[in-house]
Amino acid sequence: MSAVAGNSKAGTKQKLVEAAEALFADEGFDRVSVRDITTRAGANVAAVNYHFGSREGLLALVMARQINPVNEERLARLDALERKIGGKALPVEEVLDAFVRPFATQVRRSELSEKLFFKLMGRMFGQQGGELPPVVEALFVTVMGRFQRAFAKSLPGLAVEEIWWRMHLMAGAMIHTMAQADTLQRVSGGDSGTPGIEQTLSRFIRFAAAGMRQGADEPREESRSQGPQVEFSF
Amino acid sequence: MSAVAGNSKAGTKQKLVEAAEALFADEGFDRVSVRDITTRAGANVAAVNYHFGSREGLLALVMARQINPVNEERLARLDALERKIGGKALPVEEVLDAFVRPFATQVRRSELSEKLFFKLMGRMFGQQGGELPPVVEALFVTVMGRFQRAFAKSLPGLAVEEIWWRMHLMAGAMIHTMAQADTLQRVSGGDSGTPGIEQTLSRFIRFAAAGMRQGADEPREESRSQGPQVEFSF
DNA sequence: GGAGCTGTCAAACGATTGATTCAATTTTAC
DNA sequence: GTAAAATTGAATCAATCGTTTGACAGCTCC
């Protein structure tokens, strides 16, 4: 009976996670109480401590569940790109694509609305170092290290320090735009039905690529200027 | 007697403001209690409500005191630039300079350390719309409108919507880099004594200018490519 | 010198916080 | 079916939250 699809039925534990995700995204990590969460989930106040040990435990799980798949997909995409191209340098656009496209993948996988997903991402990136759960922070460090090396190869002639600065500038552009995506999408999307994540990704990549590239030596005849933009999808 | 310079003597009210600024910057607006502030200021718990009406009143004052001068200087600088150049289009770099240089001006004026000043700025920008005191938000809206028009003139051929997106990408790069400035300055600054705000401004402007400019028509023979970069200081 | 204003203080307010207890209940395992 | 384990529920914990109160001191002004 009740042939429910996938993850319905919704045990208390899952309902707590879903309620927490929505509330944390909407109001910020600090402004949501355990009671807010349990009330929304239709559960008892003690449920959070029973299932997750503490409020912090639930918070860590919510964060890890949303951002870790993104970071893992980033690494996988970068791996795939580098495997495909051999030892050569990747165009900056492709590295940037590997960096941001996972958001598009995961927003579709998430039960969260697009708006809330990006709000949550924005809040997570807004956290200072050390305010993230260790399991999340560790993966972040790995990701940034891997992409630093990829960018260094794509942008020869730039000092390591300069690469770091540009990566932070690039990441900041991404984060802030994501966090305010709902505001922007309202302004945008006047003509076409769906403003579309794809268009947002494209806008970001073009902006960031120009910023990352300025002043750098071009890595030998790679697809630039009029190059074949057919390789990737934007 | 007691020929104190400027703002010494430090009445309770001022000590509260200073304590609040440092704590809000360091730990975030939500994580600082009234008691944290009064304890640090060496004042009574009731002092905040007596002098500022409420915690929120003090918070609004702290925010306004730090960011409003920045926004006013932004407008003043943009006015000055446009007055100087007449009706013509400004190079993007100059508009960007008017946008970020006020931070360098105000960080020197602030009693806050450079690190805390930027942390505070980062936290303010991280706030969602409507979470800022009205007097701060209103000035922000004015500033963004004025710069939108300036950028539109500097980057002819771009749709208004596209300008907005690029401005958000640009602002995000600035905010995030500012918020993590202490982390970055630690990595950077290995060789020269002072990594220097000036170098940070320069890095940001070059990055953002490239991103803002990409794909746009150049506004007729303005200083580009090899142009006279003597006009402004970076 | 006393009325009046300003500021500070200790104390307490009710509300809310995250967490815990323990009995009652449901689910699972055999 | 029944014992064991997992989960839920209502009640309550101490701690902390922002705010308020009222007494008291310092000061000015007339």
Image (spheres, coloured by chain):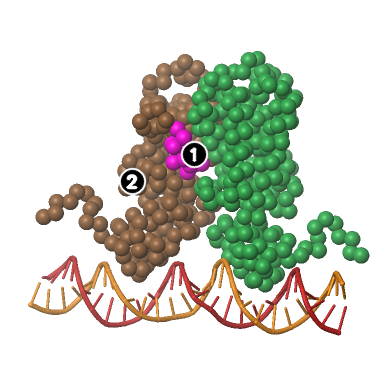
Chain colours: A brown, B green, C red, D orange
Label 1 marks which chain's residue? A
B122 sits to left or right of A53: right
Is A141 drawn above or below residue B200 in the view shown? below
Foreground residue among B141 and A47: B141
Label 1: element kind: helix
On residue A177, the disc is 1
Is any atom of residue B222 visible in this view?
yes
For marks 1 and 2, the one nearer the N-term is: 2
Q: Which mark is residue A110?
A: 2
Q: If the image is split into quadrants, where does the N terminus of chain B sit?
A: bottom right
Image check: B184 left or right of D30? left
Q: Residues within 10 Å of mark 2 (few under 14, many from 20)?
A: few
**Quarter where residue A71 is shown:** top left
Q: Is residue B70 above or below residue A64?
A: above
Confirm or deny contact between disc 1 and disc 2 (CB under 8 A).
Answer: no
- Looking at the image, which residue is at 56% across and 18% down? B217
Q: In the image, is A233 to the left or to the right of B57?
A: left
Residue segment shown in magenta: A174-188
What type is the residue that disc 1 sits on? Thr
What secondary structure do most residues of the magenta stretch adopt? Answer: helix
**For this rendering, which residue is in front, C17 or A17?**
C17
Instruction: Give me the C-alpha separation between circle 1 and circle 2.
Output: 19 Å
Image quadrant in which the C terminus of chain B is located: top right
Task: Work out whether residue B195 or residue A39 is closer to the camera in this orientation and state it.
Answer: A39
Residue B68: x percent and y percent? 67, 46
Queried whether the magenta region covers residue A185, the answer comes back as yes
